[in-house]
């Protein structure tokens, strides 16, 4: 007789993951709803890990708002069945209210016990930096933790008209729906890739996210080239002041 394989445990509910209630907005008015009710009927749940104090987050948030509002304003908005949930890393209620006040979607409220909920969620999803956009299905399965890159790709393109832009955004949403969804305990989290190519990819992405390191690497290469040239010429390296461009605080921040 063939041995039956045990079935996978059911995915956690969003009440388990996000807490019992969410902040929601209807026509700009903020209310509180049970989590199950706020996310009822949604095919995709997009978790947005972000904070008001994080410069890259403040640069990305307007793009995500445009993405969300463009989809919601379309005549076929109900077909998208998508909701974004803001998972805040703000340190104070004032910062949270200021930042969330600009957002049109739902959020985990900043109340007693919410910090533990958000930290447990970040740990479960291996969130290492913000901003991070995690795409999940309506029944709690994992789709992707590269949602930020996906949104940037479509939002940074030049479109000739709004219809062309809307088509591209709807195409991304459909792509998310078509991707294989897996239970969280089987998901490859943190953008992980296996093997040496995965290590190279992660190193490359880290350098892209941290331009200060790139400047340092270029500086070291420059000094090595100067030393080699000096040895070939039999001369000494002359002292000179090198201008280092201030990259600003555009790095992703740890969650």
Image (tube, rainbow, N blue to C red):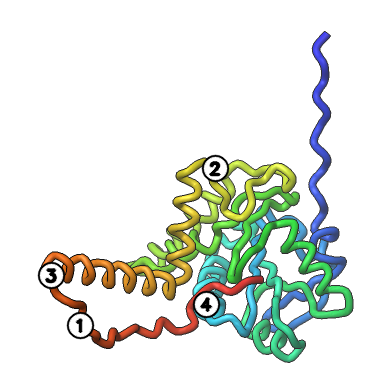
Q: Please say whether residue 234 is visible from this viewpoint.
A: yes
Provide the residue designation for mark 3: 234
Residue at (56% x, 51% y) in the render: 176
Q: Mark 1 and 3 residues: CB-CB less than 8 Å, in contact?
A: no
How busy is the neighbourhood of tag 3: few (under 14 within 10 Å), some, or many (20 plus)? few
Gap in angstroms between the C-alphas marked 1 and 2: 45 Å
Q: Position of residue 225 (x, y in %)?
A: 23, 67
Provide the residue designation for mark 2: 194
Q: Is residue 97 above or below residue 32?
A: below
Give the mark toward the camera: 1 or 4. Answer: 1
Q: Is residue 41 above or below residue 228?
A: above
- The answer to which image quadrant residue 95 occupies is bottom right
Q: Position of residue 240 (x, y in %)?
A: 24, 86
Gap in angstroms between the C-alphas marked 3 and 2: 47 Å
Q: Specify the farthest residue to the bottom.
A: 94
Gap in angstroms between the C-alphas marked 2 and 4: 28 Å
Q: Is residue 207 left or right of residue 223?
A: right
Q: Earlier in the sequence, mark 1 or mark 2?
A: 2
Q: Earlier in the sequence, mark 2 or mark 4?
A: 4
Provide the residue designation for mark 4: 56
Provide the residue designation for mark 1: 238
Q: Position of residue 174 (x, y in %)?
A: 53, 50
Give the mark toward the camera: 1 or 2. Answer: 1
For the residue labelled by badge 4, is the local secondary structure a helix, a strand or a loop? helix
Residue at (73% x, 84% y) in the render: 91
Residue at (54% x, 46% y) in the render: 193
For the residue labelled by badge 3, is the local secondary structure a helix, a strand or a loop? loop
Q: Earlier in the sequence, mark 1 or mark 4?
A: 4
């Amino acid at each position: 007789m063939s041995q039956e394989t045990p079935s996978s445990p059911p995915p956690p509910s969003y009440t388990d993951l996000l807490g019992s209630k969410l902040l929601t907005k209807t026509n700009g008015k903020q209310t509180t709803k049970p989590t199950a009710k706020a996310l009822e009927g949604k095919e995709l749940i997009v978790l947005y890990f972000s904070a008001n104090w994080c410069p890259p987050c403040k640069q990305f948030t307007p793009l995500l708002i445009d993405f969300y509002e463009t989809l919601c304003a379309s005549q076929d908005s109900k077909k998208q069945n998508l909701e974004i949930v803001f998972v805040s890393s703000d340190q104070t209620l004032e910062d949270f209210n200021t930042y969330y006040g600009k957002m049109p979607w739902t959020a985990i409220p900043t109340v007693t016990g919410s910090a533990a909920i958000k930290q447990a969620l970040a740990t479960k999803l291996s969130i290492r930096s913000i901003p991070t956009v995690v795409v999940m299905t309506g029944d709690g399965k994992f789709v992707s933790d590269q949602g930020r890159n996906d949104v940037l790709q479509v939002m940074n393109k030049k479109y000739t008209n709004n219809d062309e832009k809307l088509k591209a955004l709807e195409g991304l949403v459909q792509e998310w729906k078509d991707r294989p969804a897996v239970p969280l305990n089987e998901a490859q989290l943190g953008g992980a890739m296996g093997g040496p190519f995965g290590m190279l990819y992660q190193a490359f992405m880290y350098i892209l996210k941290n331009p200060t390191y790139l400047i340092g690497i270029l500086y070291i290469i420059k000094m090595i080239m100067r030393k080699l040239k000096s040895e070939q010429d039999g001369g000494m390296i002359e002292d000179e002041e090198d201008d280092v461009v201030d990259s600003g605080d555009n790095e992703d921040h740890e969650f």
